[in-house]
């Protein structure tokens, strides 16, 4: 398993707008199935605006759909911290988005960030 989080997008935007440097094409291996896809818009944050993704399934990667108007403003590794729901996320990777949501995930889970193309219409 990977030991660090990576953020990537699988396709460039349909417009001339450029993706932030944290986005890059997905490396596609011959027979590998696409990762499970979740939407950032569907996540329910706690009272502090935090969401925790636990990887009890053993997945190596998880795709996260972002609307075109949401940007990552901070990412890193959490120090000692517990969420409002009491989840210990010490040592987890995190991303803070400009919509106020802060997403935590276990360090061995690769997040693949994908721009939601339906938001371009």
Image: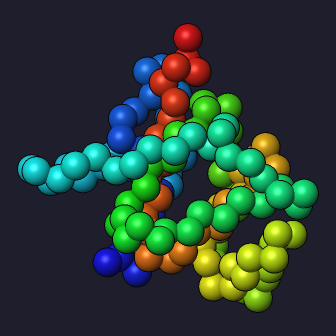
Give the answer, above or below, for where 48 lies relative to 36: below
How many numbered circles are shown?
Answer: 0
- 30 left or right, relative to 71: left
Residue 58: x percent and y percent? 37, 71
- 17 left or right, relative to 29: right
Q: The C terminus lies in which quarter of the figure?
A: top right
- 93 left or right, relative to 18: right
- The residue at the far front in this view is 57
Which is more toward the observer, 37 or 97? 37
Give the answer, above or below, for where 24 lies relative to 102: above
- 70 left or right, relative to 61: right
Which is more toward the observer, 16 or 11? 11
Write the residue at 74% across / 76% down: 87
Residue 5 visible? The answer is: no
- The residue at the far bottom in this view is 80
Give the answer, above or below, for where 54 lies relative to 67: below
Write the residue at 51% across / 77% down: 107
Residue 13: x percent and y percent? 45, 28
Q: The N terminus lies in which quarter of the figure?
A: bottom left
- The residue at the far right in this view is 47
Write the residue at 54% across / 74% down: 106
Residue 95: x percent and y percent? 65, 61
Residue 113: x percent and y percent? 48, 48
- The residue at the far left in this view is 30
Give the answer, above or below, for where 81 lies relative to 37: below
């Amino acid at each position: 398993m990977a030991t660090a989080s990576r953020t990537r997008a699988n396709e460039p935007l349909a417009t001339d707008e450029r993706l932030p440097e944290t986005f890059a094409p997905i490396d596609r291996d011959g027979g590998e199935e696409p990762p499970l896809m979740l939407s950032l818009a569907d996540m329910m944050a706690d009272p502090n605006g935090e969401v925790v993704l636990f990887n009890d399934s053993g997945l190596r990667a998880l795709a996260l759909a972002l609307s075109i108007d949401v940007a990552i403003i901070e990412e890193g590794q959490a120090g000692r911290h517990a969420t409002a729901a009491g989840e210990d996320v010490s040592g987890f990777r995190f991303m803070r988005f400009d919509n106020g949501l802060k997403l935590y995930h276990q360090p061995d889970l690769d997040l693949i960030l994908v721009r939601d193309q339906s938001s371009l219409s």
